[in-house]
Amino acid sequence: MDTVVFLVLGFSCLLLISLWKQNSGRKRLPPGPTPLPITGNFLQIDIKDIRNSLANFSKIYGPVFTLYFGMKPTVVLHGYEAVKEALIDHGEEFSGRDTFPAIDQFSKRHGKFSNAPASRNHFQQWKEMRRFSLMTLRNFGMGKRSIEDRVQEEAGCLVEELRKTNGAPCNPTFILGCAPCNLICSIVFQNRFDYKDQKFLKLMEKFNENLKILSSPWIQVYNRFPALIDYLPGSHKKLLKNANYIINFVMEKVKEHEKSLDVNNPRDFIDCFLIHMKQEKDNKQSEFTYENLVICAADLFAAGTETTGTTLRYALLLLMKHPHIAAKVQEEIDQVIGRHRIPCMQDRSHMPYTDAVLHEIQRYIDLVPNNLPHAVTRDIKFRGYIIPKGTAIITSLTSVLYDNKEFSNPNDFNPGHFLDEGGNFKKSDYFMPFSTGKRICAGEGLARMQLFIYLICILQNFKLKPLVDPKDLNTIPLCNGFTSVPPPYQLCFIPV
């Protein structure tokens, strides 16, 4: 009996605290649906298609509104003007990173993607790590081979693996994921792996599993109520186990690098980081630590492996669905590059139609519909509302990429969205698949390079043959949680 009374009192206190927090915070924040105690607006959101729920709320409350995920308020920015005003015009104030419990539990809030500036130290740490990563990727001050050389080498290996299918039906998921993963291995570890290497296969398996888990409805629930669900079984436990495997894998490579490090001849990302560690060994405030090295390397894999592989997989599906578009791309390849030379990034400026197709693929698939979670770094007055420091921010990239004022018939796959009347490539400020502002994806250039070179190499060497009539191909994503994942399919890579 005492236990029942205790539970009732505890639940009543929780309800009162929830109501007090919600009522006290709502006065200054943008409008939004009335939250329920404890759960907030969570039960009013379709966690299998969050972007559609946000669009519906926007129709009622406008481009800036507030949702409560549990007792925590989140300001949603919907539409190009609101997203641009926040991330570009007020870039510094909106450059914080909100908590992402499914990732934060193993990243320990280190690394360049996962750091939320809950304190100035966290914010400075993120800035320092991002600056180093961008500089290293841009200059690639290691060895004598550029990143483009490495992408071209991997493209050749990818083509050879596809040849081994002998034109038989296959699911391209694994092979298309291997190429970007191997490229990151080359940048971080210096060496690529054979596609049959068992350690490489296991690493790929962990990345594949984690992307599926992060895109699942369960993780959306976990991210909102981590304190409660931490004690329950579920896929969040598998996510942590896989992440620990990846981190341990990287740490082994770090130890190997230390034994053979030559400070005058850095070979890869790890060497560059270790050299900075030595240079700052007397600086007690240095961000160049083993923990940050391992998390930064793991971040590079997380940001540059599955996302690129998924985009490639979606690209092939869309080209099979629209064979007339694939034919025009092939025609441009034949005119500019031919069938026997590996493409380079200089070719892209001479291929406006192909460039438009690549942009349209990324716009249409809407890979990360709601972006990674942001947070404001200080109290800010935004469009007449006061958003307190630390408030979570969701920026709907879907609402920008599918804006019907910029893209006529945005639900249609149409490269014409990026072409002018003369057939020349047309840029758009609304093209934000990598986000925008200070938190724009650090690997944007690398991703764009891979998509162009890999896709061109595939089309140079193979005809894509679907197993069903093109009009019957399904291009609707499996789910819209963290990322948009294409439905599974098979095709034949017919050598040409």
Image: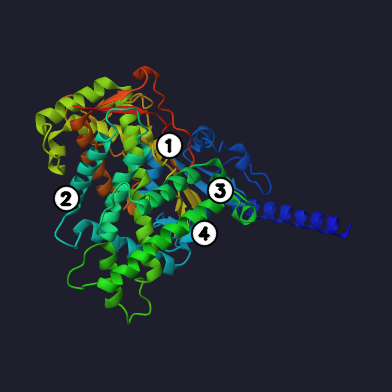
Q: Quadrant of the N terminus?
A: bottom right
Report which residue position mark 1 lands on: 485
Residue linked to disc 4: 105
Disc 4 on helix, strand or loop?
Answer: helix
Viewer-nearest residue: 70 or 361: 361
Q: CA distance from mark 2 to mark 4?
A: 36 Å
Q: Residue at x 21, y 67 (%)?
A: 266
Return the x and y of residue 435 as percentages of the image width and height.
35, 46
Q: Earlier in the sequence, mark 1 or mark 4?
A: 4
Number of the label disc, if any, that sits on residue 173: none
Q: Select label 1 or label 3 by which is in front.
A: 3
Disc 1 and disc 4: Cα gap in Å? 24 Å
User: For the residue labelled by badge 1, is the local secondary structure a helix, a strand or a loop?
Assistant: loop
Q: Are marks 1 and 4 in contact (CB under 8 Å)?
A: no
Camera-near label (3 vs 4) is 3
Dot 3 or dot 4: first in sequence order is 4
Amino acid, disc 1: Val
Q: What secondary structure is marked by label 2?
A: helix
The residue depicted at 11 percent of the width and 31 percent of the height is 338
Give the residue displayed 21% in from the left and 64% down from the top. 267
* Residues at marks 2 and 1, CA–CA distance in whole angstroms: 29 Å
In the image, residue 302 lies at what x, y percent?
A: 38, 52
Residue under numbered circle 3: 235
Q: Amino acid at mark 2?
A: Asp
**Quick one: 447 or 372, which is closer to the camera?**
447
Residue 472 visible, this orientation: yes
Location of residue 282 in the rendering, given as x and y in whole percent from the top left corner: 32, 82
Give the label, 2 or 4, closer to the camera: 2
Decide: is 246 above or below 155.
below
Near mark 3 (Cα within 10 A), the count class, few <14, some 14-19 or many ≥20, is some
